[in-house]
Amino acid sequence: MRLYLCEKPSQAKDIAQVLGATRRGDGCWTGSGVTVTWCIGHLLETAPPDAYDARYKRWVLADLPIVPGQWKMQVKAKTAGQYKAVKRLLAEAGELVIATDADREGEMIARELLEHCRYRGPIQRLWLSALDEASIRKALAALKPGAETFNLYHAALGRSRADWLIGMNMSRLFTLLGRQSGYQGVLSVGRVQTPTLRLVVDRDRAIADFVPVPYWTIEVQLLAEGTPFTTQWRAPEDACDEQGRCLKQALAQQAAEAMRAAGQAQLVSLKTERMREAAPLPFDLGTLQEVCSKKLGLGAQETLDIAQALYETHKLITYPRSDCGYLPLSQHGEAPAILAALRRADPSLAPLEAHLSPSRKSRAWNDAKVGAHHGIIPTAAAQAFERLSGRPRAVYQLIRARYLAQFLPTHEYDRTQADFDCAGQALRAVGRQIVEPGWKRALPEALAPAKGRDAPPAQTLPPLRQGQRCEVGQVNLKDLLTQPPKPYTEGDLIKAMKNVAKLVEDPRLKQKLKDTTGIGTEATRASIIQGLLDRGYLTKQGKALAATPAAFGLIDAVPRPIADPGTTAIWEQALDMVQDGEMPLEEFVAKQSAWMSRLVERCAGLRLTISGPPLTPGRGGKPWKKKRAAGRAAATKKSAGDRKRAPAARTR
């Protein structure tokens, strides 16, 4: 019997239908010589400290660091029934096809089970990017040898064990240090969550420490043969800051008075340039979360949940947990069928038909830049669109628009820059005239690029000629103040996590963070932010995130490497070596254990100053959800010493 092992029940059902396995069994679908079973995420979890020694049920400084000699896995109680079904099927299988999600974590979900159940038969790998029938059939016809993806498992296992070491040891350490100073809450520490928290703490401090600086601008209305347009005063460089803002009030006042008195301005330079803008890439998950936060007001986790439903339930989009916006050239041949399906499913796309060209290849089609996953795009199963409404419909339309944009012409416009002299003062007007709307025909207005605070108004200039004199209309002297940084929203924080390389000085680590798209993964960033909210490290007012007093105290106390995103880059370099077979898993874990032991020794004598009440789940602005309570219950306890383990111990 050939057994297919999937990650989720819905995924298993889709694959089973294509394979003809239509009979429902105990935790599986069966057919002629074929059985399809499923996990429910991870059916196993790394055992807690007390599984190694009962004394670890109590949190005691003298017991740290806790470093397992032989790592143990245990069956998750909630899904023990499905584990038994999978174990039985593995014992009966003559060969196995791993059909979990095509990434590190998906590989680990399957391989940890095979190891725990001692499966020793032949293995192949199904590598899926979408769950519509056509995509499944295509992947089934191109199964990979199991050995080709095995090292993904060891890389994921190394990351998991290193996260365990930090979570279990540093969370216990800082919770116990907090108690010594009178703080009775649990202080959770994690490899990704703590650098992420530091981003918000640093931003909040920048806002609190910000001192506004006054500056002055002048907006001058000119008339060219009776047609008004707007120009901006260009102050001398020696009177401006690095952003070009005039800091000298007297100079600005004198310039405004002089231009009012002059009455005319002469055109001294006129330049028109044809500008061409390529279509934006299809979405990766982080960019989708950023746009949905800004334009639709969605939280990062809510966006991921909607995208996952569009993928699993509706079959409308490809795999959503992608960190790549590029597309493989091999998929370009599917474009005519997908475009036709999109047009049939939604008659409102009819005006685009004359402009769409299925043969067009935008910059998105680039095999060299496609990793394990490609950009999030619609599938040919577009007829399900009519069943969507509300936010899922809006998210799908954003994804669809980015795909349609790849088959529309380049956006072109003429940019005209006109420089004037008015009483010895420099004025500049900038105008745009659209020549070819191109891909912008497909994008909803909500996707128009946002303008900066000091951006000149968009306008179309009247016909102008060199040397022309224009009448001066209104002269508006504006007294302004520099603005503090804006608080993070969830979308902004996702973007900051992706682009955290900007904060790292070491050029090698900076490049590594760029290559790995920052800290966290597309699949985990939303849950990291939600975890910080749930644990009370962050609060939410409207869209804005803010750090709590305990978050400030913790970031000030933890060793710099724990809160430094550069540490993640070092880890990722080592995990890449594990994935490439250049470093054994055991060596990676041994190095992490030694490093953690040094940190514990160095920090054991610290004195913490943590202000504010103990962290309580639910203070982050959303109701505490019962379904999450079991995994994080200890976070609400005043004393964790007589509890099984802290909730934070499994944090990333």
Image (tube, helix red, strand yellow):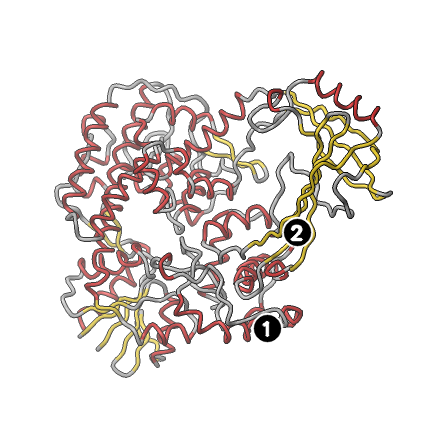
Residue 188 in the image: above or below residue 4: above
> What's the amino acid at mark 2?
Asp
- Return the residue at label 1: 343
| Side (left or right) of 355 relative to 600 | right
- Return the residue at label 2: 414
Give SS at disc 2: strand
Residue 20 in the image: above or below residue 627: below
Give coordinates of residue 136: x percent, y percent. 37, 73
The quadrant where residue 227 appears: top right
Give coordinates of residue 448: x percent, y percent. 62, 50
> What's the amino acid at mark 1?
Arg
| Image quarter in which the C terminus is found | top left
Give coordinates of residue 166: x percent, y percent. 27, 36
205 or 404, nearer to the observer: 404
Write the residue at 18% across / 37% down.
Answer: 593
Work out how far the residue at label 2 is from the one at label 1, CA to CA, in angstroms.
Answer: 31 Å
